[in-house]
Image: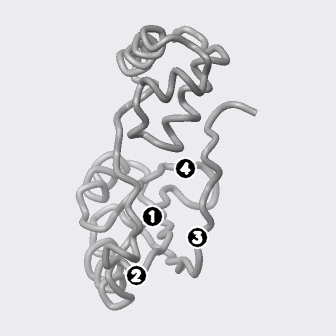
């Protein structure tokens, strides 16, 4: 079992979620800890895979991906592993979640336009062996999530 996170660890995560390029000096100053402590804690969080990496926060519309949708999928239960891997490999699929409830999987898909989205859903996803049916929910607007990850 992983070591529980304390308030400083949660503060580090909050700060890095808000700005992953923050310097260790700035991080240490904001949390009122030494730079050595900040370095050690970030390294421990990375080594234990609490921090899985640092990525650019890309605006999909500015990057030419003007259409976003959630695609729900019902699967033949015996084929979920194979279908999951095929879905993860598709261009434009940002996130794949296997879920319980009315659907078996939910995808976040970002494409240049509705025509490209339609081709992906109708010609690729629905043709996959193991896919029973899909539903596509177009995203009209996305609200920015708060920068805080773990602390109150």
Using residue 113 as the reference point, say whether residue 134 is left or right of it: right
User: For numbered disc 1, what is the local secondary structure?
Assistant: strand
- Residue at the image position 30 percent from the left and 78 percent from the top: 120
Q: Mark 1 points at which residue?
A: 108
Tell me which label, 4 or 3, sits earlier in the chain: 4
Q: Badge 3: few (under 14), some or many (20 or more) residues near its Cα, within 10 Å?
A: few
Between 148 and 22, the one lying in front of the other is 22
- Residue at the image position 61 percent from the left and 17 percent from the top: 32
User: For numbered disc 3, what is the local secondary structure?
Assistant: loop
Q: Mark 2 points at which residue?
A: 66
Q: CB atoms at circles 2 and 3 under 8 Å apart?
A: no
Mark pair 2, 1: CA separation: 13 Å
**Location of residue 13 in the rendering, given as x and y in whole percent from the top left corner:** 54, 30
Q: Name the residue under label 3.
A: 142
Using residue 43 as the reference point, say whether residue 100 is left or right of it: right
Label of residue 99 in the image: 4
Between 114 and 30, the one lying in front of the other is 30
Q: In which quarter of the image is the C terminus?
A: top right
Mark pair 4, 2: CA separation: 26 Å
Mark pair 1, 4: CA separation: 13 Å
């Amino acid at each position: 079992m992983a070591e529980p996170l304390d308030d400083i660890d949660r503060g580090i995560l909050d700060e890095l979620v808000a700005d992953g390029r923050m310097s260790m000096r700035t991080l240490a100053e904001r949390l009122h800890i030494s730079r050595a402590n900040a370095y050690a804690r970030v390294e421990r969080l990375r080594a234990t895979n609490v921090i899985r990496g640092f990525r650019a926060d890309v605006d999909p519309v500015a990057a030419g991906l003007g259409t976003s949708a959630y695609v729900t999928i019902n699967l033949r239960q015996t084929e979920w592993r194979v279908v999951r891997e095929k879905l993860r490999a598709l261009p434009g699929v940002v996130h794949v979640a296997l879920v319980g409830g009315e659907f078996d999987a939910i995808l976040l898909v970002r494409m240049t336009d509705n025509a490209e989205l339609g081709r992906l859903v109708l010609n690729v996803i629905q043709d996959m062996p193991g896919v029973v049916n899909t539903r596509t929910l177009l995203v009209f607007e996305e609200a920015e999530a708060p920068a805080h990850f773990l602390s109150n």
